Image (cartoon, helix red, strand yellow):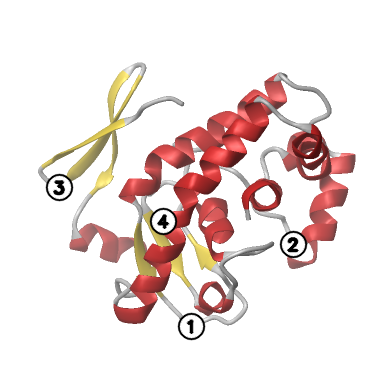
Amino acid sequence: MKSYHFKNVGRQVFICIASGWILLSASGGSAQAQIFDSPPCAGDELAAANAALSQVGPVLDKAIAALKNPNVSDAAYMDVWLGIKSHPSPAADNVISILERSRAFVSGVNFRCAVKSTTLYARVRSTVPFTIDLHRGFFIALPHGYSSRPGILIHEMSHFLLTGGTADPSTRSLYGTEPARERASKDPAAAQRNAENIEYFVESIAL
């Protein structure tokens, strides 16, 4: 797995990649307040979010290992959710890259709690790494299975431009397991860049 290094300089956060240090975002409360108007998570909500986050690293490790050296069931999940029929392959490598970069961001994630919408799980701004805004749907989700709390976090983390810049389905009717299966079957390239499909693949492997 690739190793990424972070550093803080004043109120700015930098990440070291092959080309050198690049600016991620301003850090600190005032900068976060400009991203979302919701407050930082606290109390039971923060505990629930951190518990889910503690699962994300091991879950991603399993999914990455499955993509690199799949067994029969892993290969089936790769086909069902991502439309990947051969491995190793450039398609598998691209998904591995998204998951590895998401894995590198786990220790830097922080949460804000909107807890307003019952129809949303969470949201992020793709240009602002680290911050995930959690809604009520996240807190009523289960810790395992499809649309799990860890899976939701992985879904959101994959949206960050520095992890993968993945897309969401274009309409609400295209969310869910059945549309994701159809997407992988009819348009594998789109599935491999879609946060729903990546989430369901990871959940199939490790949750």
Which part of the image, by quadrant, shows the C terminus?
bottom right
Q: Please determine whether, in this image, residue 86 is positioned above or below residue 45.
A: above
- Relative horizontal placement of residue 78, taking residue 185 as reference (left or right): left
Name the residue tied to disc 2: 175
From the top left corner, tell me how far across and down residue 157 is, in percent: 49, 49
Q: Please determine whether, in this image, residue 92 is positioned above or below residue 126.
A: above
The residue under the point 53% across, 59% down is: 150
Viewer can see residue 18: yes
Name the residue tied to disc 1: 116
From the top left corner, tell me how far across and down residue 174 is, in percent: 78, 60
Q: Residues within 10 Å of mark 3 (few under 14, many from 20)?
A: few
User: Of the numbered discs in the image, which one, if any, rests on residue 50?
Assistant: none
User: Of the numbered discs in the image, which one, if any, rests on residue 54?
Assistant: 4
Q: Nearer the viewer, mark 4 or mark 1?
A: 4
Q: Amino acid at mark 3?
A: Arg
Q: Residues within 10 Å of mark 1 (few under 14, many from 20)?
A: few
Q: Amino acid at mark 1?
A: Lys
User: Along the line of sight, which residue is nearer the eye, 164 or 47?
Assistant: 47
Identify the mark nearer the N-term, 2 or 1. Answer: 1
Name the residue tied to disc 3: 11
